[in-house]
Image: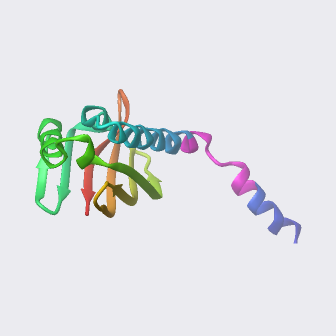
Amino acid sequence: MRSMLLIPVLFFGCADPVTMDERTAIRQVMHAQEEAWDKGDIDGFMKGYSDTICFIGRNGMTCGKDKVSANYQEAYPDRSAMGDLTFGLHEIVLSEDATAWVTGTWELQRGTDTLDGGFSLLWVKEKDGWLIARDHSY
């Protein structure tokens, strides 16, 4: 009976603190993206994306940070079109090769409507920190 009690203590007691820091870093980038979006700052929002970003959505796939940014600027030309963005994170799955999968939901509340959907993001840890390399939003 004592050995069964030690297993959970050892398992949780040996949790890798770096893992929690990595998840926190990803959450912070997503929070900064929400804040930038809510200010109408697409350039600030784009700071969370890698230069090698490929965005996959209803209209197909767009690759390259400049092209993805141009698509956002066309679809959301002003602050009222952008509304208030909220992310809901479901999970952050880290791998040993400095990548992570993040899944969750997004909601965009605007004066005239509310849009929502989900996402699956592939993150890469680059020299500047964690950035999104693939964004599949639906």
User: Which quarter shows the N terminus?
Assistant: bottom right
Q: Residue at x 21, y 41 (%)?
A: 78
Q: Is residue 14 left or right of residue 100?
A: right
22 versus 109 height, above or below: above
Q: What residue lies at 31% left-to-right and 54% top-to-bottom?
A: 111
First to last magenta residue range: 10-20
Q: How far from the left and from the top, in percent, is residue 27?
A: 47, 44
Q: Nearer the viewer, residue 47 or 15?
A: 47
Q: Is residue 127 left or right of residue 52?
A: right
From the top left corner, tell me how far across and down residue 108 is, in percent. Answer: 33, 55
Residue lying furthest bottom = 1
**Magenta-drawn stretch contains 77:** no
Q: Residue 31 vs residue 137: left or right? A: right
**Residue 29 place in picture, x, y as percent:** 41, 39
Res 112 quadrant in image: bottom left
Where is residue 129? Give x, y as percent. 39, 32
**Residue lying furthest right:** 2
What secondary structure characterizes most of the magenta part?
A: helix
Q: Report the number of numbered marks.
A: 0
Looking at the picture, does residue 56 appear above or below residue 65?
A: below
Q: Residue furthest top?
A: 127
Q: List the single residue furthest toward the front.
A: 112
Residue at point 40%, 54% (across, down): 102
Colour scheme employed for the rendering of this structure? rainbow
Name the one closer to the observer, 89 or 6: 89
Quarter where residue 97 is shown = top left
Which residue shows up at 29% across the image and 37% down it? Answer: 40
Q: Is residue 100 left or right of residue 47?
A: right
Comparing 121 with 69, the one in front is 69
Q: Is residue 113 above or below residue 82?
A: below
The quarter of the image holding the C terminus is bottom left
